[in-house]
Amino acid sequence: MKGIEMDDRTHKLPQENMLRRRAEAELQVTSEKLAAMSESDVLRLVHELQVHQIELRMQNEDLREAQSALEQSRDRYNNLFDFAPVGYLTLDDRQHIRESNLTMSTQLGIERVNLVGRRFSDFVVPESQDLLHLEWRAALETGRRQMELELELHRGDGSRMCAQITCVKEPDFDSDYDTITYRCAVTDITFRREVEALRREKEMELEYLAHHDMLTGLANRVMFQQRVTHVLTRARRQKRDIALLYLDLDGFKQINDSFGHEMGDRLLVLVAQRLRTCVREEDILARLGGDEFGIVLEEVSEPWGAPRVADKVIEALRVPFVIEDRELVLGISVGVCLFPADSTDASELIRNADIAMYQAKRRGGNAVHFYTPALTEAVHLRVSTESALRRAIDGGELEVHYQPMMELATGRIVGAEVLLRWRDSCRGLLLPDTFLPIAELSDLIVQVGNQVIHLVCAQIAAWRARSLVTPRLSVNISARQCMSDEIVTMLRQALEHYAVPPLALELEITESCCLDKVAIGTVLPMLKTLGVSLTIDDFGTGYASLTSLRNLPITSIKIDRSFVAEIAHASGDGAIARAVVALGRSQGLRVIAEGVEETRQLDALRKMGCDVCQGYLIAPPMPAEEYIQWLQDNACMNQTPT
Ligand code: C2E
Ligand code: CA
Ligand code: CA
């Protein structure tokens, strides 16, 4: 505004001087003309002059009025500019603030003199700088006239202001339109943003309240239902089994009635804490209401995964709770339902688990009941097999069969694998696959393993007593047996007891055994020291790398049956078998192939450089007497053990 006034004054002064000079010159001419005029002409002239004078005065008055109107409108504009409800800034093309209205300075709490001349970006918080920079560049490069952006600005008192800014780019008329001006309207939206944030926070709080149990902090029934639905969708896609456990406390009502709700609440919190220790982080645990809880187990890989957790829960609650020096005893009834075996949708799964829980309660509580007949059967099978197997060990129903192993280069029988059989009085001869997986679930496998060692040593001793010298025997050892040095003691004692030389035995261990720290560090080296040699069974199906084998006391590897079977298939070329043979030989290991059923497999294996073969083509597993007969028939007897 000041600039405009200055310009008016500097233009007006020389113009007035010029006018005066011209008027004086004309007056000179007029005076000369006047002297030559008649009196009547002079009077007429004076009259006209007076009229002119009046006209001029009137014109002057009009001008003054117009000027005052202009001044009023300018004042009005200034007021509007300063007290507009939005902040207003004019920036030059280098972001310097050239003008600011009063609202802007009030919004920021910074005096106008401290704004004008400074760069606008000086007032922008670091987190918003990048956005400003980007938008500004885009406006410069694209020639876009308008930009809208939301930035946070520093206020004078150190607080932050959330600003919604609309900038319009214009040529600057003050500088004859050769520079650019940005006119920016700045709205303070801090309050609006704060309200929004508060609302979001409240919504989240409500959401939490709607999905959680306030007392225990666990998920509530609504959330449980939602998560179960979600988990089932995923399980359906990944073809996985899910188990849902419905839990109900036994005896909670009595405690609540006798000691009051406050005590009841405290007890529920402690129960929730104990339940948490029974499940993994990724399992779902919820309080379904009152004294009812729910658990969802993802990835139940075996039928007894769920009962195992149920047992854990019952055990966890068996220890009395102590509140204010008072011991409180609770029990828990657990119902289990499986997806997809029993139910395929979330509500049904929860309902069926609930039904199963009632069955457990009816049986007196502190028990697990399975909704599924299949699961009940699986658990029954496990329990009955375990006890039958225990009886079989004691009753001498376990026996071992022998399957010869032949050296490919010479055709000599260089060993035999010892394979376990269970001669059950009702069911006949049982193969290991029907009972060993169940034995593997507990320490029962260790007892079975010990029995096998004793049977084998006793057999060798018996043969020796009959002067029958048989090839070396390979005994299968389970991974669980390798994980404790008990096997070393047991084996040493058995060898001593039956006076069997360690050289007469070889142990077949699994790849998983080679990954176990105790096995690698202690058990395997001790077995080696004892003098028995070690073979890795089913090689290629696990994760053992040959580099890890290099440091182990291993002498042979056995290619898994499946890779040998591939050699016989029209489609398979036996590439894996070939690779395993090459790998084994490169490490100086003896390579054995099992499951050889056809001559072409035998030929192929021979060509690959495999050392030893075993399979139905040579002979099936046979009971002891049959095996001796077979050896005699094939003229393999009286050989020194290899
Ligand atoms: P494995 O160690 O792989 O034993 C070889 C299996 O292949 C035996 O089955 C054997 O009968 C079978 N087999 C032999 N020749 C052929 C053939 O030409 N073709 C086919 N398809 N199969 C053949 P089995 O006796 O049923 O034993 C199964 C598994 O049980 C064994 O597999 C081994 O892992 C385990 N096992 C057997 N006895 C014992 C034992 O005393 N202790 C332990 N821990 N595990 C044992
Ligand atoms: Ca084996
Ligand atoms: Ca095998």
Image (cartoon, rainbow, N blue to C red):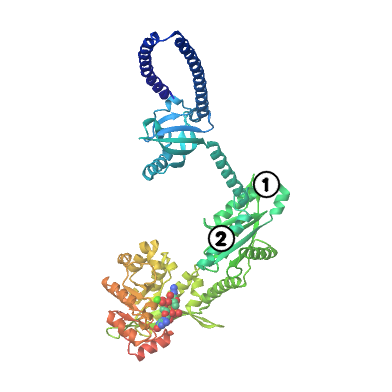
Numbered disc 1: secondary structure: helix
Q: Is 272 or 535 nearer to us in this picture?
A: 272
Residue 438 visible, this angle: yes
Q: Is residue 324 above or below residue 631?
A: above
Q: Quadrant of residue 552?
A: bottom left
* Res. 263 mark: 1
Which residue is at a point 41% across and 33% down the rendered structure image? 91
Would you say 441 lies left or right of 366 here? left
Number of marks present in the image shown: 2
Q: Quadrant of residue 120?
A: top left
| Residue type, mark 1 in image | Met
The quarter of the picture showing ligand 1: bottom left
Would you say 263 lies left or right of 396 here? right
Extreme-right residue of the structure:
257
Residue behind mark 2? 230
Extreme-bottom residue of the structure:
633
Q: Position of residue 176 (x, y in %)?
A: 37, 32
Image quadrant containing the N terminus: top left
Which residue is at a point 37% across and 62% down the rendered structure image? 522
Would you say 29 lies left or right of 160 here? left
Q: Is residue 585 above or below residue 234?
A: below
Q: Who comes first in sequence, dot 1 or dot 2?
A: 2
| Residue type, mark 2 in image | His
